[in-house]
Image (tube, rainbow, N blue to C red):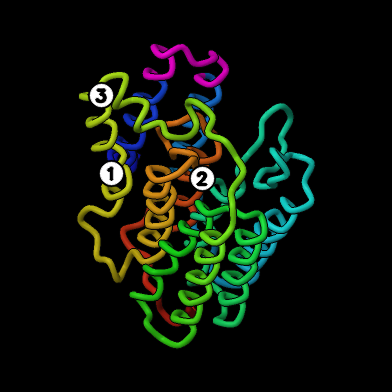
Amino acid sequence: MARQLTRLSAMIIVVLMGCVYMAVAGAPRAYLVVNGAALAAAIGLAVFLKRPVPGFNVIALTVFALALFVGTLFSSAEIDGIHRWIGVGPIRLHVGLLLLPAIISLVPGLRRELALLTIMVIGLTGSLQPDRATAFALLSGVFVLAIAKCDKWSLGMLAFAGMSFLSTLLQIDPLQPVRFVEYVIADVWEFHPPSGVIMVVFLVLALVVPLFGRSFRNQIPLAASLATISGFAIISVFGPYPTPLIGYSASAIIGYGLALGFSGFEKQGVRLDQHETL
């Protein structure tokens, strides 16, 4: 367990730094409580959750996640007519941040046809919302899968993810940024530039440290899920989209832990062998 916590250390530090910034900058206390609880949940998921064996379990988990993605289009949890969330009591969870990195880590365990269908459903949902951040994160994760396999199926997934992202670029996103959620890196930089630099460094480390000392070929699910989270982080710099791990968002923090758990983070390697069909 000590080894897993070491690999999670950058994520833990950047989340705590985000909480410190929010406390100093006057964020509601509830933001700190939610992010703190989400951090505890993420650590537990990353350390104790097991990668499901390819087969029925992976299919069932993927179908359930896709149902939640599609369900957001009809959810009452909306802002300015945009549906990207599911309501859990008083908290709205962003489905893309919560589930997409984990789904990407499961895609290699699906049959090729179902893997392509999964990417198509998520891409179409992102286009219809529209959700530019989820569409770019999808493209980022699928890009890693395409590099790993480079066959017609993975390239087809990459092409569809690219078209989905392009579609969101052609649409107007009416949502306005919320302080402590979007543009957090810019806000921290304006508030205290050295802290902004340190936060960015630890955010980058949180997205690469879990891969240290491991072969890319043995960690494709983990690499793809981290690339997906990186996609969310990158696009948050260029638009009003949630800043993962640093900003107020239980979805991003729990989604990180869920992705690492499902990607076989606790193992030395997860090979794409005959059981991993992508």
Helix, strand or loop at disc 1? helix
Q: Residue 201: where, in percent of width, then height?
A: 23, 37
Bounds of the magenta segment: 20-32
Q: To which quarter of the image does residue 176 belong?
A: top right
- Is residue 15 something one can see in this rendering? yes
The main secondary structure of the magenta stretch is helix
Earlier in the chain: of badge 1 and badge 2, it is 1
User: Disc 1 marks which amino acid?
Assistant: Val
Q: Is residue 223 left or right of residue 167?
A: left
Q: Residue 184: where, in percent of width, then height?
A: 40, 31
Q: Is residue 203 above or below residue 170?
A: above
Indicate yes or no whether the magenta region holds residue 45: no
Earlier in the chain: of badge 3 and badge 1, it is 3
Q: What's the CA distance linking mark 1 and mark 2?
A: 16 Å
Q: Which residue is mark 2?
A: 255
Q: What's the CA distance linking mark 3 and mark 2?
A: 25 Å
- Is residue 40 something one can see in this rendering? no
Q: Which residue is mark 1?
A: 204
Residue at (57% x, 77% y) in the render? 116
